[in-house]
Image (cartoon, grey):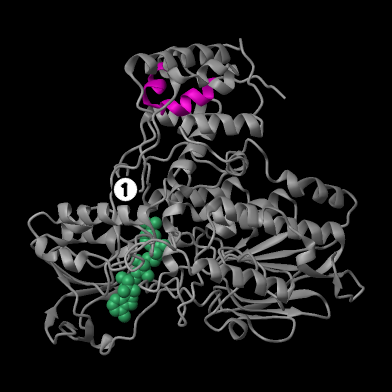
Amino acid sequence: MTRAVRIPGKDEDLRAALEDVNLPNLLMVLTQLTNEDRWLSPRFAPEPIVAPEGSMFPDDSGGYADAVATEIREAAFGVLKELRDGQRQLPPPPTLDRFTEMMSFSVAEPVAREYAAMLLEETGFIDRDEQWRSDLNRAQQLSEQGDFRVIVIGAGMSGLGMAAKLKEARIPFTVIEKNDAVGGTWYENSYPDCGVDTPNHFYSFSFERNPDWSGYFSKRDELYAYFERCADDFDVRQHIRLETEVLFARYDDGRKLWDVRIRDRDGAEETLTANAVVSAVGQLNRPFIPEIEGMGSFAGPLFHSARWEHEHDLDGKRVAVIGTGASAVQFLPKTAVRAAKVTVFQRSPHWVSPSRDYYRPVEEGLKWALNHIPYYAEWHRARMIWGFADRTWPAVNADPSWPHPERAMNEASDQMRAALTEYIRSELGERQDLFEKCLPDFPVWGKRLIVDNGWYRTIARDNVELVTDGVDRIVPEGVISGDGALHEVDVIILATGFKTNLFLWPMEVVGRSGATLAERWGDYPRAYKGITVPDFPNLFCLYGPNTNIVHGGSVIYQVECQIHYVMQCLTAMIAGGIAALEVREAVNDGYNDRVQAISEKLAWGHPGVQSWYKNSQGRVVNNSPFSLQQYWEVTHDLDLNDYLVETDNTGDRASAG
Ligand code: NAP
């Protein structure tokens, strides 16, 4: 289908925008709008995408000679002017073959068809919801939905995304949120310089793009505002109960329903009933407070990075920071320029990567293009995903013939290690005495690479001390390190991360047999595709076990894959009269055996890595063992044969096959 389009503004606006845009993206827009193959000829072939030494953020600008760049801009100007003036029609989205060809040309390397298929959905060129929409619509027209209801727990990113789809699908639902606002992580974390480390045009819902991000990596206030806006744009606010906590959720095998006990802001308790429950509680929302002797005796303020106490002025203060993960790396530089002294207690160093775009504002012309040039936003997203996400996947996989498995997974990972090691040296400048303390002893990508915002330069400052002797205890005046030295401080900030292995904690979730999820899982949580759990029919987890991404990518992408899968499950239930949908034990076991077998050969499963991704037995329980594209495949199609189903009123625990 073709349709007319109007591009607003004057010629000058269009010309100005074309100066700021990425040329390979523009070339693809031009190719799509004209359907002329000449734009895919060698004259217009871009340079391959390259990541500057040691950086995971690539340069995809194409490297065109001035004459070719001008030719592309002039041609695009002409075509877009015609579109604006109504002399052209907008062509339909590309076919899979054409898109694969165009993607491969624009990134100067072969793009697999399967990858292109995923990108077609991520860009919205193909509407992935069509997979469930028509079946659901048909059932709803036949009034088969009955009083089917869903309860979503959490109104952060995952809960809002789920709510958006439930609303669109006209499935009644309620979202229960413990905070007094939506936004989850981006509401709770407000420490200085808090922001995203995934390019923002990817870190946003595929179905709710934001063409107006102010930066390539925006900061907390803008991210929080985005999710607030999502709640309005999705028109879901009236379904969200804020300041209400779920105490327990219990599956009633007789009624095939979930009873969800909640407590509101006034302490009043109530039991809600639903056919399905979706947990959208996140992995990083319950701060981990280590048990350090004497913590209660400290005379000054002591708080966790995710519960930043802004009322304490840090100007001229002596501050202790315990922990050196992504949160500490983000807030330390801004803290060190204000404090009299900062003492950083580091248990183990992380790998930190440079990024040229970290503080780069988005050019006005690019915002204009994202808003107004047809298909520009789609190509921008597709090529950004290609450049940022799975290109690092080969480097995280163990090469069995690689001779130095103690330090790297393979040659590519070793090259990255060498480049990042050099980066540490260059950033430390005259403070090379700190080099050994800053050098991690595990392979790159063993933990998520942290984007640098001046970490080493801050560590090298005169008013910063890096302590690596451990924390022995806390006394009223400060912190005693492992070597017995007293570090006198006025404020202690715990940047010690989150309770990550206790999924869904502290809620009590009781399954069909009466056992709780906590009893079933212990500290080895496992779910089928990270989503469904045997003995817990009609329970769906978003951002559940083994779904976090380390090698590069957006957790919103992962969650959208899960929401897509959940929508298929709900559609199957509504359209098929299924009262209970429970993943088979053997299917779940087989899947998780595979997850563990793959994880052992990935950088984050490396025996030298101690992290929040692993449980007490060293199993990786948080991270996905799949590339983004692989996980898209894993979650793309519901196979009811994986499930035991009970249809309405029969009580049958039948195989679906
Ligand atoms: P984290 O990565 O878990 O780091 C916690 C830090 O505290 C680590 O350095 C850890 O040391 C240390 N620690 C824990 N217990 C300790 C103890 N008893 N004594 C001394 N040190 C202790 O937590 P985070 O920095 O809050 O980040 C959590 C996750 O949130 C990240 O991995 C990332 O996925 C996400 N995040 C993302 C961004 C972003 O997008 N830019 C920003 C912040 C957080 P060890 O390393 O030795 O365990």
What percent of the width, then of the height, locates residue 486?
12, 83
Q: Position of residue 651 (x, y in %)?
A: 89, 76
Which of these two is toward me, 241 or 406? 406
Question: Are there few (<14), some (14-19), or many (20+) residues within 10 Å of tag 1?
Answer: many
Q: Amino acid at mark 1?
A: Ser
Q: Quadrant of ligand 1?
A: bottom left
> On the image, which quarter does residue 356 sit in?
top left
Which residue is at 46% across, 40% downward? 384
Residue 28 magenta-drawn? Answer: yes
Q: Is residue 584 above or below residue 119?
A: below
Where does the image place residue 109, in percent across and percent down from the top left? 47, 35
483 or 599: nearer the viewer: 599
Q: Residue furthest right?
A: 650
Q: Residue at x 77, y 68 (%)?
A: 643
- Please state the extent of the stretch shown in magenta in the rendering: 15-30
Give the vertical position of 29 relative to 210 (above or below).
above
**Residue where numbered disc 1 is placed:** 55
